[in-house]
Amino acid sequence: MGTGWLLWSIASALRWGNWLLRGGLPAVPSVPELLYLAGAFSFLWSLASYPVNPPERFGRLRELLDVAMLTLSVLTLSWFTILRPVVNAFLAPPVQVFWAGVRPAMDLVFLALLLRVSLLIGRAFEARPLLLLGATGLLLAVGDLLAGYETVLGDLTPGTWLDLAWIAAAWAAALAAHSTGPAGEAVRSSIGHGRRRIEALLPIAFTYAVVGFTLIDAYLTGSIDKAGLTVSVALSALLLARQGVVAGQTEMRQYASLVNASADLAFICDETGRLRLFNPAFSTALGPTPRPVPPVNLKEYLTGTASVDAILASAAVEGWTGEVFLRRKDGSSFPALLTLRPVENLRGPGTLIAGTGVDLTGIRAREDALRGALQDVAAARTELQSLNVGLERKVEARTAELKRMVQDLDRLNRELKELDKLKSEFVTLVSHELRAPLTNIRSGLELMLAAHPSLDVSIRDTLTLVEDEASRLGRFVEAILDLSALEAGRFPLRPYPVSLAQTASLSVERFRGHPAYTRMHVELPAGLPDVTADERALGSVFFHLLDNAAKYAPTGAITILAEAGAESVEVRIDDSGAGIPEGERERIFDMFHRLDSRDARETYGHGLGLHLVKRMLEAMGGGIRVESSPALGTRMAFWLPRADGPPLADPQPAGSVEGRSG
């Protein structure tokens, strides 16, 4: 930057000295213009190479591309906005226009590069000089732009107010050179994520500006500017290359961070063992300086190894792995597992070697502890063997005793099965014997009520109550008979395609005359596929579930819904009752289990309906679950296989289902 100021000072002295001696400015191009151009390049190079970030080997190409794109974009925009309009207006010869516009163009490039440095700078004491340099650049840009305008018109003379702008710029630059912080200050400020993002988008924004300006200019003028088109294509190519470099740089940073964060030692050396790169773990454990002078050699850290040269020679050809001892910076050593692998060197002769070292100190300590533990285990095993001898005798005696107990339990089990069989046969016999009298009682009551419509109200109510109780008892008998048939394997199930909508409607019709009939609604979607089921069993399932909903939800709607899946159809019966506690949702399917088992209860039942429903659904390849909450009531959801779906893998006949009475 000082070189640039010196060249500019010499150029200004020659230019205005020529005016004093000859009474006019030298014709362009002249030595002062060439000196100014050289000084401008010095300024631009100072900003392009300014160390704004810590040195990074794989980040230099991206910085070079950013500077190139910014410089080329600003020069192109200067051509469009400053030089080309003057050339097209024929105000002066093209050579004179070029040398009149080169100064403001260079000033704009200077400002663009200064903006990039300002966004990336991380040292707080450099903020003030950069701000003053920005003011210098603005003053120079304004002064040089006006001077170029007067040069094109031929009116530029010394001693005008333009000299004040250049003098002010010189003073601002002088202040910038002396405005750094205290000597030795190394305060760093954090670079915000937003500033980094803006700097990353700066070359892209300038590239889009050039391409957009070229397209808009072509649209307005009807012709394409060849220079603008060429630069646009070049900038687009540079942008693609830059994005590729950014992607590679990001990937490389991730790998570098991975290696640097590793607790294992990692390094790169040549065939002679001279270290080229190493991670912080290597530096912490072994202690080389970040930039060792003279270069650190791996041989200095290997101790107790027969031939380091032989190890390196083998590693350079086919790799090497083995245990070595490494010397720490304090003189102590530790065992390590060293792995060396050859790496092709594309930038010079010879082969590089990548190495990793794992500290085995902790592993060796654990091995010693493990050996001690194994010795303790061996002693304990000897003691255990002696205890086993006495234990085996006790086990033999206990085994004989358990064998006798098992025989007794087997005998008792056979007796219980026989009693259970007798119980089932007795229940079935009693139920069969009750079915005919109950049917006769119900038929007689129906005929009596129908034949004598003028009976006294109290008598009619009494007979109606008797009829209802007989019906309830009949349903109980039918449930017992169906359950007995299921357990005995005699329940006739004939699965075939059945319409859910038709079966649900017929089941609801069975409740006609019941107080809950008006609250029952069938809301099945159109096009619901048929299910594979026994029609009688499916009707019994609907009846028991609707009967339960009517008993335990005395108010509110009872709704039948359904949804078809890929292999089955799920039916849901919702009510607005009190709900079922979570701990009871599985037990309600047990035989004779009821939530309220007291003698005096409002809702009467025997706990057989839901057990029978579950057994029938499982026999037809389906199942049932409960979804309930005190706020939403109870939902009984059961599912059956679709008639148009794949057949069951192992269809199970109803009679082969084991009994699960509660």
Image: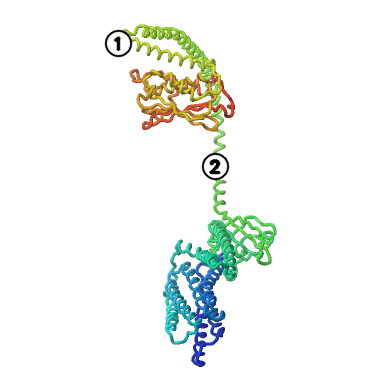
Q: Quadrant of residue 282?
A: bottom right
**Residue name at image x 44 percent, y 26 percent:** 522
Task: Indicate the position of residue 659 as horizontal and vertical percent values.
Answer: 50, 20
Task: Indicate the position of residue 519 as horizontal and vertical percent values.
Answer: 38, 25
Which of the pair 206/243 is nearer the observer? 206
Dot 2 falls on a residue whose secondary structure is: helix
Q: Vertical placement of 248 versus 137: above or below? A: above
* Amino acid of disc 1: Val
**Residue name at image x 68 percent, y 65 percent:** 350
Q: Is residue 432 visible?
A: yes
Total labels drawn: 2
Mark 1 sits on what residue? Answer: 457
- Give the label, 1 or 2, closer to the camera: 1
Q: Is residue 394 visible?
A: no
Task: Indicate the position of residue 513 as horizontal and vertical percent values.
Answer: 38, 18
Q: Quadrant of residue 548?
A: top left
Dot 1 falls on a residue whose secondary structure is: helix
Left or right of 221? Residue 347 is right
Mark 2 sits on what residue? Answer: 376
Which of the pair 635/53 is nearer the observer? 635
Sequence-wise, the earlier of marks 1 and 2 is 2
- Extreme residue toward the front, this view: 222
